[in-house]
Amino acid sequence: MKTKSVHDFLFNKIARQATYKSLDAGMLRSKATAQNIANVSTEGYARQEVSFEKELRQALKLKSKGMVTNDNHIEISKIARMKKVQPYNYQPYDPSNASGVNNVDIDIENAKMAENQILYNYGTRFASMKKLQSSIVGRVQ
């Protein structure tokens, strides 16, 4: 049985696809958080959140193998499932009125913005590592 190296794990197609999808989710989450902060004093505004991680986990843990041998076949690989995972905005159920005007708590939103920025910066560095590795080896990805 062949053991996978750390290199194989970090630079496989599934990890890269998950990283790119995470960057998309980070952008959407940044927009939602910025919108929440901008509407902190708007009466009746309902804060927005982004859902992504749960769907990503579900797509990654499903065990199915398949090979497309004909163009009319439906691909069932992890890569195919990853392509279908999309982040989306939603309004969480939150009856609180943190600011007295709506359910946006400026301190929580600022913390979420900082956390999201750290994750996004890490994701961009990770995504660019593969390109850097390809340029060193001399292969185009």
Image: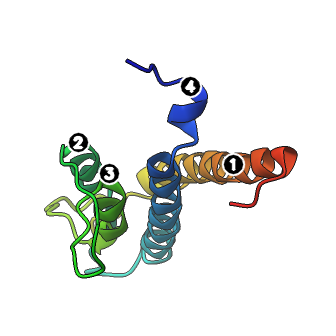
Q: Nearer the viewer, mark 3 or mark 1?
A: 1
Inspect the image, locate mark 4, and give the three-letter code of the amino acid beneath it: Val
What residue is at 69 percent from the left and 48 percent from the top? Answer: 130
The Cα atoms of the two marked residues, 3 and 1, are separated by 22 Å
What is the CA distance from the residue labelled 1 to the residue labelled 2?
A: 24 Å
Q: Residues within 10 Å of mark 3 (few under 14, many from 20)?
A: some
Q: Secondary structure at mark 2?
A: helix
Quadrant where the image shows the C terminus: bottom right
- Residue at 29% x, 66% y: name it: 68
Q: Which numbered tag is attached to residue 6?
A: 4
Choose top left, top right, bottom left or bottom right for residue 47.
Answer: bottom left
Check contact, mark 3 vs mark 2: CB within 8 A: no
The amino acid type of the residue labelled 3 equals: Glu
- Nearer-the-camera pick, 70 or 122: 70
Question: Is residue 5 depicted above or below 68 in this figure?
Answer: above
Q: Can you say which quadrant of the picture contains the N terminus?
A: top left
Disc 1 on helix, strand or loop?
helix
State the image coordinates of residue 70 (x, y, percent, origin top left): 27, 75
What amino acid type should be assigned to the residue bearing mark 1?
Lys
